[in-house]
Image (cartoon, grey):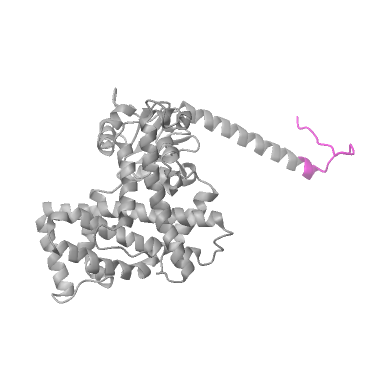
Amino acid sequence: MTSLLFGADGRLLPVFDNLGYLALGYLLTSLVHRYYTGSKTKHRLPLPPSPPFAGHLGNVLKNRFPYLLYHDWAKECGTDIISTQAENRTIIALNSLEAVTTVLEHRSTMYSDRVQDVMKCDVMGWGWVMSSLPYGDRWRKERSLFQHHLQPSSARVHGPRCLRFVRGMLLPRLLEGPSEVIPVIRQFLGGFTLSVAYGISIQSKNDPHVRLAEKAIAGIRLAETEETYLVDSYPILKYVPSWVPGASWKRDALKWRSWEVDMREKPFDMALKSIRSGKFKPSFTSEAVKALDLEANVEDVNAIRNVAAMIYAAGADTLASSISTFFLAMLVRPDVQIKAQAELDKVVGQHRLPTLDDRHNLPYITAIVKEVMRWQPPCPTALPHLARQDDDYKGYRIPAGSIVIGNV
């Protein structure tokens, strides 16, 4: 039996209004039913598999190459999605391009949060890094800053700068001898990223600004030598005073934090001083602050400081890793080096160095660059994401709050 609806004055509503309200009620009831049914269905789905007695945090932490461990587990389980348990949290590893694209790209809004590591983010002070920020206004602002000033078209701006550093610093130093290749690469990239981020010039050797970034990154590396910190499981421990017996981890963290603060603040303060004096070189910082009232827009200035430091530290570290891998690849595959040299000689001859305009005529060398990044990516497990709500993939459940890793 269909119920009739009456208005506030007690009169029967027109038939159209009755049908409209009934349709709306039916629609809302259907949506609520679908939501709860879908939610229950997802909760009934199993977690992705993990090999017996292998899928636990200790096995991952004790392994120097967890990305290979995830890959082996995926092959053993016959699926491109696996899981492991880290105390009270689930880790989901995606082991194929299809899985990474479907979950992390097509459903990006569900996985836009990042994992907050208490030791590194809170105690050591690295919580400002964009890759550690939760999804929100601050993350959007800093991401917008980064993309606006460092989009692909920016190569026209930074390309000539890169050539100057390659020709004026990297090549002359490499020609001095092969004994210090890695330090030379790091010095070159430290100088280049300092120039891009702040417009700061460096010394050809042992520059103190390059050393700031190296020390800050070294603090992260030293922290990673420990399998885990108790403070990550019990965050209240971050308030333990450093003088308490047994709190050596806190004393170490405060020392490493001072390195991070120096790296983030000293170059930025120097750049601001140059900008205020009118004697500065174009950089990310000078472009980002030129439209600001530096005294009134404190929040915006902090965002610029954070993004500049990220360019400085992450660029120098990841790029140095990739270029070092290239040298290793040429050592183990001299036949590839010979073919690359032949292509280069054919395009540029013997009397000039290549420029960015030659890139389209160097397909073999371009392929080598891409293969280096595919073969040994600087971050094999990319950046861990945090599932904001329950999801499923190929019949497996991805619980809200789980850590999702794209194992590239």
> Which residue extends farthest bottom?
351
Q: Is residue 16 magenta?
A: yes
Give how far across and how far down residue 20 sits, in percent. 74, 43
Residue drawn at (33%, 37%) of the image: 223
Q: Percent from the top left, x then y, of residue 405?
A: 37, 40
Q: Quadrant of residue 165?
A: bottom left
Q: 357 or 1, which is in the foreground?
A: 357
From the viewer's perspective, tell me whether residue 182 is left or right of residue 227. Answer: left
Q: Quadrant of residue 188?
A: bottom left
Q: Residue at x 18, y 75 (%)?
A: 352
Please state which of residues 202 and 50 is positioned toward the viewer in this rendering: 202
Residue 366 at x, y percent in the picture: 24, 62
- Residue 76 in the image: above or below residue 302: above
Marks counted in the figure total 0
Q: Is residue 144 magenta?
A: no
Dominant secondary structure, magenta: loop
For this orientation, the residue located farthest to the front is 243
Camera sees residue 236: yes
**Of residues 43 and 375, which is closer to you in this image?**
375
The span shown in magenta is: 1-18
Residue 12 vs residue 261, the one in the foreground: 261
Q: Which of the image's four quarters has the N terminus?
A: top right
Can residue 80 be seen from the camera position used here?
no
Q: Is residue 35 above or below residue 342?
A: above
Q: Quadrant of residue 331?
A: bottom left
Question: Looking at the image, which residue is at 26% across and 34% down?
Answer: 69
Q: Is residue 45 above or below residue 158?
A: above
Task: Quarter of the image for the C terminus: give it.
Answer: top left
Picture coordinates of residue 221, whole percent (x, y) = 30, 41
User: Which residue extends farthest top?
Assistant: 53
